[in-house]
Image: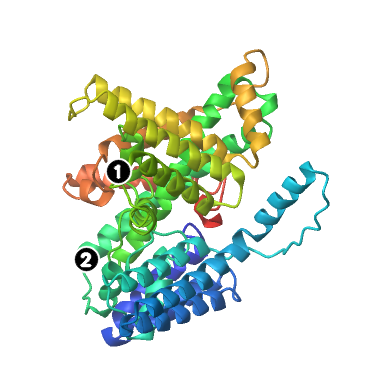
Amino acid sequence: MLFDSLQYIIFLPLAVLIYYLIPYKFRWFFLLLASYYFYMSWQVEYALLILLTTTVDFFISQKIYKTTSRKLKKILLATSMTVNLGILFFFKYFNFINSSIQDVFSQFNVFYDKPEFHVLLPVGISFYTFQVLSYTLEVYQGKQKPEKHFGYFALYVVFFPQLVAGPIERFSRLGPQFRQKINFSWINFNNGLRLILFGLFIKMVIADNLAPLVNEVYNKPEVYNSLSILQAIFFYSFQIYSDFFGYSTIAVGSAMMMGIFIMDNFKTPYLAKGIAEFWNRWHISLSTWFRDYLFIPLGGSRVKKYRFFLNILIVFTVSGLWHGANWTFFIWGLLHAIYYVFEMLKKKLFPLQQTTGWGFVNITSAIITFLLVSFAWIFFRSESFSKAMLVFESLFNNYGIQDTFFVSNIIWVLLGLFIILDIILYNKRFDTWIVPKKAIIRWSVYAVLLFSILALAGINYNPFIYFQF
């Protein structure tokens, strides 16, 4: 059940209606059932994996909190991480590791009988695994008391708006909201609808109409000229952003209709003036997860320089592999680590006074950052390293009369509209920006968004990119 499907358009209003009609003390149970139904609409059997993860961490967190033995706490935490990361490894990385081992052995003419398991990757497994681990780690660190009610904890794990592609919520923020007596609010309901409308627009109108152009070039880059390759590179930058930003906006809006607030996952990342700022604005729930549970435990920035750079390298490469079991994701993460380290060194060697506003320096910095990020996306999008090399080869060598792919004027208009909206929404959210406007402006914007969805959605349907992670 995808957010941009007819099933969800029917499911969400019914869920919201029933949620407000039943007594508040039973709402958690209804949301739990609705969330499991939502997940089982993809794979019924994989709901058992979520239940296993939920059960293991519910009881382990209780034991961690109660015991005074430091050694036992570590053993319990290790058990939780082994179970959760073991399941994630088996489904997501087992075949990748075996293929990599086979490739290494083949270089030395050594036969390796590679075992393979042909199983579907459970939807959202990377997201809910990290969400559960954040809870157990917080309990272990003494920052969070364990939830004593299994049902409330289970709901935290499977809450449907953010179950399959985030944001990765902390229990301290999301969990207590399920216990609150929430009265119906037209403000929350209408703001939720506004966010859903905007999210559907940027997903179904922007991302889905860029996707076939990107796919065409990346599937056979060798037949296209440099200009076409360059267009596809930039189009993918906006495709993945509008796709994931669209999903996250719909998720926030869906929860808000029920009076539940989840975090914003994006804050105009392509207007960042450096790589560090980009990661403060892109997939915020994941970047803060790695900051709190990997970077800081490794020593963070309060270590010697070489160790700091090593920590950055570890965090970004692990982040790359979190996205997918492919060396292209590793290289993508490695590139961002190099960008980050270079930026830190540049600031150290050539300190410049920070300026506000959008003068020449900041505009130039934002453009350079966007170009660097777009360059790295080539590896993220490519199916293999060899495919990525074909993209680069065509980009720098095919200046002749190779094929040029056609881009209709409507694509340029839509992309321009999205860029303008993104600039307008710098450090704002769509609902907080649109509400204070005059009625004629508000309804004109709603009409344009709705008409665009009705006219252009469905022509080039593509599932959400981050569902594969």
Label 2 residue SS: helix
Label 1 amino acid? Val
For disc 2, the marked residue is: 186
Q: Nearer the viewer, residue 71 or 344?
A: 71
Colour scheme in use:
rainbow
Question: In this rendering, would 351 be left or right of 402?
Answer: left
**How packed is label 1: few (under 14 Cα within 10 Å), some, or many (20 or more)?**
some
The numbered dot on residue 445 is: 1
| Number of numbered labels in the structure image | 2
Label 1 residue SS: helix
For marks 1 and 2 on the same chain, the one whose residue lies earlier in the sequence = 2
Question: Whole-percent x and y of residue 198?
Answer: 35, 49
Depicted 314 relative to depicted 289: above or below: above
Q: Quadrant of residue 86?
A: bottom right
Question: In this rendering, would 374 be left or right of 170?
Answer: right
The numbered dot on residue 19 is: none
Q: Nearer the viewer, residue 182 or 387?
A: 387
Q: Nearer the viewer, residue 325 or 197?
A: 325
Question: Whole-percent x and y of residue 387?
Answer: 66, 35
Depicted 70 relative to depicted 389: above or below: below
Q: Residue at x 38, y 61 (%)?
A: 168
Question: Whole-percent x and y of residue 43?
Answer: 60, 71
Q: Is residue 410 something that shows in the picture?
A: no
Question: Whole-percent x and y of residue 164?
Answer: 48, 63
Q: Is residue 213 something that shows in the picture?
A: yes
Q: Quadrant of residue 230?
A: top right
Q: Residue at x 31, y 46 (%)?
A: 303
Q: Residue at x 41, y 33 (%)?
A: 339
Label 2 amino acid? Trp
**How packed is label 2: few (under 14 Cα within 10 Å), some, or many (20 or more)?**
few
* Mark 1–mark 2 distance (CA, rounded to whole Å): 20 Å
Depicted 51 relative to depicted 284: above or below: below
